[in-house]
Image: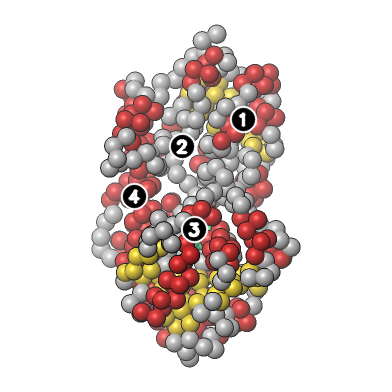
């Protein structure tokens, strides 16, 4: 089979590499020439574990890169749209790129094909794309909704071993094309769920909304624990042990971020509003997500009084570990609040220094922020250390090295990843989310 994937970002490139790895011929299309040039040199323009190896293994035999959409879609059984759907100012999804690609594909197709909506799009978008196709296409183009559920940081294993593949189509032939493409990934049991395009579109938003709600919920319970003098880490374990609830996404911390949860929840709320429905739970999950960073800032203001003029080491910039994505990162939100209070920040991250620099520059924060490549260097002369992203290497740090270089003795654990007794024994005060603050034992 031969397919084209338009949009070579986290989703498009992972999908392209994984399909190519099963023998499908894939051409990844993008408008970003710089990105394509890197890929043609065998370099992946962002960090995703194991992705470079897979790209190199398949390129150029079964995986290629192009900016020429018309040429790329020739001979393709299916064309995937995996371009970004960023939020508009009112929270709704910006579908300009999706609709532009749909138009380009329709105008340039010289044979029948299946057009697959892989980008996250609100319910009703399949219908809108069908209207674009109807206006511009000469050949039969069947529009299928096939939302993507991969997580950055685990993208390859999520794509290769999906919990489910959702396929929204009323057309048997189009479904057969998609089923054939995904068959290698669902061999153990058939997890391909066929449904209407509208249902498929809603599955994606409903899944993200429920996962984000779990995060906001446990953060709310963390607030209750703090007020009552309980420990949310014990509460989390007690709650998650219920098989109906489970432990996943039940970790208290600075809140969710990334390119999906915040924007998808806002888009869900916005679409519902347009349809005359209120999604109050999702609205609350978005609003509650602002709270943990604000609480952490208050703790730091109290613990360091005054915060103004202090030097703060921040470990972690990406919105979660194993990615260099800093879109809507809680770490960056906290940094901007620290800077607004007059603090100086020295931040580090194993993978996200480059992406964070771009984001911090555009927010005009770089005058007060220094980025360094090593976590112990970040602590040099710092009054306090904040852990903002739960990278594995931050879980068991060398406290004697921290103590050697750090001026102050306060650690703020924004992800509840440190072992309290070890922190205290090392002579630091410990502040976390939903747990009592503790003073050093020595
Ligand atoms: P991204 O920003 O990493 O990549 C999008 C790519 O599309 C960019 O390389 C951009 O240059 C390209 N592009 C934009 N307009 C184009 C056009 N007209 N023609 C060709 N290329 C064009 O985005 P992403 O994170 O991969 O997300 C893509 C979609 O998948 C979004 O709708 C997102 O919500 C959804 N999604 C993302 C994730 C995730 O974890 N990142 C997971 C599931 C679903």
- Label 2, secondary structure: give it: loop
Q: Is residue 272 left or right of residue 78?
A: left
- For the residues labelled 1 and 3, the Cα–Cα distance comes to 36 Å
- Label 1, secondary structure: give it: strand
- For the residues labelled 2 and 3, the Cα–Cα distance comes to 27 Å
Tell which tag, 2 or 3, sits nearer the viewer. 3
Q: Can residue 297 be seen in this snapshot?
A: no
Q: Earlier in the sequence, mark 2 or mark 1?
A: 2
Q: Can residue 53 be seen in this snapshot?
A: yes
Circle on res. 254: 2
Q: Is mark 4 within 8 Å of ligand 1?
A: no
Instruction: Name the residue tied to disc 1.
Output: 313
Q: How many marks?
A: 4
Residue 46 is situated, as x and y percent measured from the top left of the image, at 63, 54
Tell which tag, 4 or 3, sits nearer the viewer. 3
Q: Is residue 55 left or right of residue 202?
A: right
Above or below for 414 versus 146: above
Q: Is residue 172 left or right of residue 374?
A: left
Instruction: Name the residue tied to disc 4.
Output: 210
Q: Earlier in the sequence, mark 1 or mark 3?
A: 3
Question: Extreme left residue here?
Answer: 277
- For the residues labelled 4 and 3, the Cα–Cα distance comes to 20 Å
Name the quadrant containing residue 21.
Answer: bottom right
Q: Residue at position x 58%, y 32% from top?
A: 394
Instruction: Name the residue tied to disc 3.
Output: 159
């Amino acid at each position: 089979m031969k397919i084209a994937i338009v949009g070579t970002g986290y989703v498009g490139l992972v999908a392209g590499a994984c399909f190519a790895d099963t023998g499908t011929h894939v051409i990844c299309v993008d408008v970003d020439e710089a990105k394509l040039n890197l890929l043609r040199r065998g370099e992946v323009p962002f960090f995703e574990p194991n992705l470079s190896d897979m790209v190199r293994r398949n390129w150029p035999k079964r995986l290629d890169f192009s900016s020429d959409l018309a040429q790329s879609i020739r001979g393709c059984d299916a064309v995937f749209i995996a371009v970004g759907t960023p939020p508009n100012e009112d929270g709704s999804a910006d579908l300009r790129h999706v609709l532009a690609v749909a138009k380009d594909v329709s105008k340039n197709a010289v044979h029948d094909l299946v057009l697959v909506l892989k980008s996250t799009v609100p319910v009703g978008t399949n219908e809108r794309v069908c209207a674009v196709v109807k206006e511009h296409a000469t050949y039969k183009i069947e529009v299928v909704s096939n939302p993507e559920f991969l997580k950055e940081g685990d993208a390859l294993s999520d794509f290769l071993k999906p919990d489910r593949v959702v396929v929204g189509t009323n057309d048997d032939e189009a479904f057969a094309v998609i089923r054939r493409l995904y068959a290698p990934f669902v061999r153990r049991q058939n997890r391909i769920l066929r449904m209407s395009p509208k249902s498929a579109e809603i599955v994606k938003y409903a899944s993200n909304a429920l996962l984000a709600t779990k995060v906001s919920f446990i953060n709310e319970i963390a607030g209750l624990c703090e007020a009552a003098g309980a420990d949310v880490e014990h509460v989390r374990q007690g709650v998650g042990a219920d098989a109906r609830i489970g432990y996943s996404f039940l970790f208290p911390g600075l809140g969710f971020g990334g390119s999906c949860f915040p924007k998808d929840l806002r888009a869900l709320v916005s679409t519902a509003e347009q349809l005359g429905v209120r999604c109050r739970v999702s609205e609350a999950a978005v609003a509650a997500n602002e709270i943990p960073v604000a609480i952490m800032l208050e703790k730091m203001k109290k613990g360091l009084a005054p915060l103004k003029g202090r030097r703060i080491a921040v470990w972690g910039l990406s919105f979660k570990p194993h990615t260099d994505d800093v879109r809507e990162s809680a770490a960056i939100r906290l940094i901007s609040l620290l800077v607004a209070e007059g603090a100086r920040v020295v931040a580090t991250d194993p993978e996200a220094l480059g992406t964070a620099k771009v984001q911090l520059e555009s927010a005009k924060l770089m005058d007060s922020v220094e980025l360094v490549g090593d976590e112990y260097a970040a602590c040099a002369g710092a009054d306090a250390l904040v852990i903002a992203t739960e990278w594995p290497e931050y879980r068991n740090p060398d406290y004697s090295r921290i103590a050697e270089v750090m001026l102050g003795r306060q650690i703020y654990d924004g992800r509840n990843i440190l072992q309290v007794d070890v922190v205290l024994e090392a002579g630091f005060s410990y502040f976390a989310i939903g747990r009592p603050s503790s003073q050093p034992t020595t």
